[in-house]
Amino acid sequence: MHFASPPTLSCQLVPDRERMIVRVVGELDLEGAPQLTAVVDELLGVGFARIVIDLRGVGFVASAGVHALLRAHRSAEASGCTLELVRAAPAVHRVFELTRTEAALRFRDDVDIG
């Protein structure tokens, strides 16, 4: 008997004035990264000018997750969209420091900053 495992990642969309906040919860890994990519692609396709990806609910980021965020950043720039990331917990955020990708992405400490 085979039981389906629960998804490792969920994305909740929260409209906030002129921007869309994507609250990410779970593991941003090989299984979850495509889901985040699809959400960002859809928001860009609709024409959002500002997207904030809230990573505070993420417990783990794999290389596939880093790649998905870099891809989202490039796609947003190409669409004229501002993409910002709310930092995950320090232990999780460390992956961006270790992979030297922190400078390539736009991080902020809080979702409430205008």
Image (tube, grey):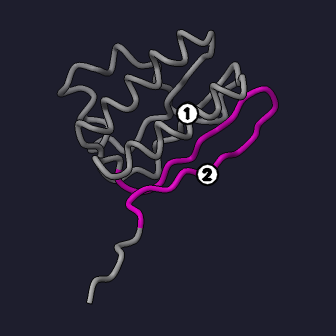
Of labels 1 and 2, earlier in sequence is 2
Task: Give the extent of the magenta segment.
Answer: 7-27
Residue at 69% of width from left, 34% of height from top?
Answer: 20
Q: Secondary structure at mark 1?
A: helix
Q: In x, y percent, where is residue 79?
A: 60, 13
Tell me the amino acid under the disc marked 1. Val
- Residue drawn at x 70%, y 19% as measured from the top left: 49
Residue that sits furthest to the right in the current view:
17
For disc 1, the neighbor class at 10 Å (few under 14, some 14 to 19, many from 20) is: many
Q: Nearer the viewer, residue 24 or 79?
A: 79
Left or right: 93 in relation to 95: right
- Residue that badge 2 annotates: 12
Q: Is residue 94 left or right of residue 86?
A: left
Seen from the viewer's position, the closer of residues 35 and 91 is: 35
Residue 102 found in image quarter: top left
The residue most toward the left is 98
* Residue 40: numbered disc: 1
Q: Main secondary structure of the magenta part?
A: strand
